[in-house]
Image: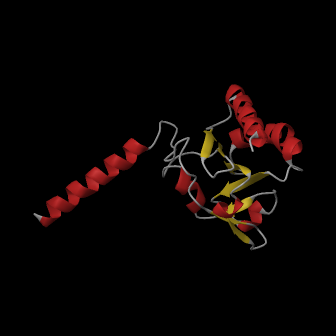
Amino acid sequence: MKHLTFILLLVMTCSLAKAQQDDRGYIVKVGEKAPNIELLFPDGTKKQLKDLKGKVIMIQFTASWCGVCRKEMPFIEKDIWLKYKNNPEFALFGIDFKESKETTEKYPLLLDPEGKAFYTYAAQGAGVTRNIIIDKKGNIAFLTRLYDPKEFEEMVKVIDKLLKEK
């Protein structure tokens, strides 16, 4: 009987986890408080996402082997990074998914060698190329998956709007 109870509990837990995940693999939703993650820099410096409250934050999960990620990068640089890099109310963190420090150091990216940060936001088995926009209060304001020009344009508008808010 104990084994049957355990199996039922396991099945219910897995079903609930799957039900809470959206069709793009996110386990978080717009409007929710952004889960805290550790930001690990290649030089060993660590920061906590929660300590950046008061800024509009963009987290981009990426990987060097990801073709869609490489396609999106020039747009992130041109339409977001160059536009906001001097704004003290904005922070952009590219997080390299499950790659070595040696690979990550070739790019201006943070480390996530075990995928802990990624799996705080996305389900096991979900793909990279996703952006999370967090408002100044620490809530998720926008989520993207893959690179879609219209969605990307909407994300830029959301960032503009959030930066204008007091």
Please tell me which residue is depicted at 74% across the width and 39% down the height of the picture: 159
Q: Residue at x 80, y 51 (%)?
A: 89
**Measured along the vertical axis of the image, is residue 117 above or below residue 159?**
below
Q: Residue furthest bottom?
A: 44
Q: Where, quadrant-wise, is the C terminus in this rendering? A: top right
Whether residue 115 is visible, yes or no, is no
What residue is rendered at 22% in x and 58% in y? 7
x, y percentage for residue 15?
A: 32, 46
Is 83 left, or right, of 37 in this rendering? right
| x, y percent for residue 115 | 58, 60
Q: Residue at x 55, y 42 (%)?
A: 31
Residue 47's place in the image compared with 76, above or below, is below
Q: Quadrant of residue 3?
A: bottom left
Q: Quadrant of the N terminus?
A: bottom left
- Looking at the image, residue 72 sits to the left or right of residue 114; the answer is right
Q: Position of residue 37 (x, y in %)?
A: 61, 62
Residue 146 in sight: yes
Q: Point out the residue furthest to the top here.
A: 150
Image location of residue 25, percent across then percent down: 50, 42
Examine the rendered structure and indicate whether residue 42 appears above or below residue 92. below
Which color scheme does this rendered protein use? secondary structure
The residue furthest front is 166
Where 49 sits versus 71, above or below? below
Displayed quadrant of residue 49: bottom right
Query: Which of 82/18 is in front?
Result: 82
Q: Nearer the viewer, residue 117 or 48?
A: 48
Number of numbered callouts drawn: 0
Q: Is residue 91 left or right of residue 99?
A: right
